[in-house]
Image (spheres, rainbow, N blue to C red):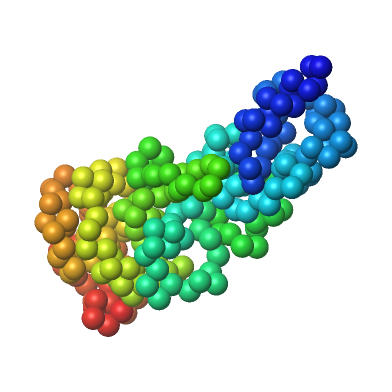
Amino acid sequence: MQKEISLNQILQKIPHNTVVTSVWLNQQGISNSLMHSYKKNNWFKSFGTGAYSKLNDNVELNGALYAVQTQLDLSFHIGGVSALSIHGINHNINFNRKTYIFGLREEKLPRWFKEKYNENTEIVKTTILPENIGFEDNNDKDFSTKISTKERALFEMIYLAPNKSSLNEVYQLMESMPVLKPKLLQELLENCSSIKVKRVFLYIAEKLNYPWFKKLDISKVDLGKGKRTIEKGGKLDKKYNIVIGNIEEI
């Protein structure tokens, strides 16, 4: 009877097509031996080292990230150009590229996640932005995961430029975003620790000169000191003190 009650309670807590971790199961009072019994009786199947899924579920990346975020309380989320694509902003984006997953430097993804998704994801560990600014829910049928807003995703994309994303791509995507939230952009600018990201963002934003740019208070943004070389062989923009290619040429 105790096993049946425990199983029913667990099944009700797990959305379809998501991962359930052994860490979370132990927290719910389900021992590894009891879980082995559930698996033996075809209630669950193994998803990898320390992870399971319901027998007939088809777990994709979002279902795995759901467990990472809600059961393991880790910061990893879809960000950068991958988040922009989810938001429907994908001008000239290469659809064969890996999905960018951002998280804090000190955190580690579980082994089962790496076993399943290492080939299709690129993990970026950084602390350039706080973990309480610039997120929204990406709703699936039975659950939702946290992803970067358009505004935060832009900062994350610029962080990887020009190595992972060209500045031309950044410019084209920003060009297709005439409507952004200036209040959120201001908050991101004031809390971003990367001088490079802030300078490049403002440089391109000023070139585009959308209404949201005019609402930013740059006097409150720490842009650091000294020159930053973004592109070798580029020209120096004296206002933002960055060496970068002309926007018409990149």
Report the side of 64 relative to 238 (left or right): right
Which one is in front, 138 or 76? 138
Measured as percent of width and height from the top left, residue 240 is found at 19, 62
In the image, taking residue 186 as reference, residue 131 lies left or right, namely: right
Quarter of the rendering containing residue 50: top right
- Name the residue located 15 percent from the left edge and 51 percent from the top edge: 216
Camera-nearest residue between 4 and 36: 4
**Quadrant of image for the N terminus:** top right
The picture places residue 132, in percent across and down from the top left corner, at: 38, 37
Image quadrant for the C terminus? bottom left
* Residue 203 visible in rendering: no
Q: Residue 89: in sight, yes or no?
A: yes
Residue 21 lies, in percent from the top left, at: 69, 36
Task: Measuring from the top left, give residue 115's x and y in whole percent.
Answer: 71, 53
Q: Residue furthest top?
A: 2
Compare residues 176 and 23 and report the one nearer the observer.
Answer: 176
Quarter of the figure with residue 171: bottom left
Looking at the image, is 164 positioned above or below residue 142? below
Looking at this view, name the residue that lies furthest to the bottom.
249
Q: Residue at x 43, y 72 (%)?
A: 93
Q: Which residue is drawn at 58% across and 59% down?
A: 121
Query: Residue at position x 82%, y 33% from top?
Result: 38
Left or right, 48 with reference to 132: right
Number of labelled discs? 0
As drawn, 239 above or below 155: below
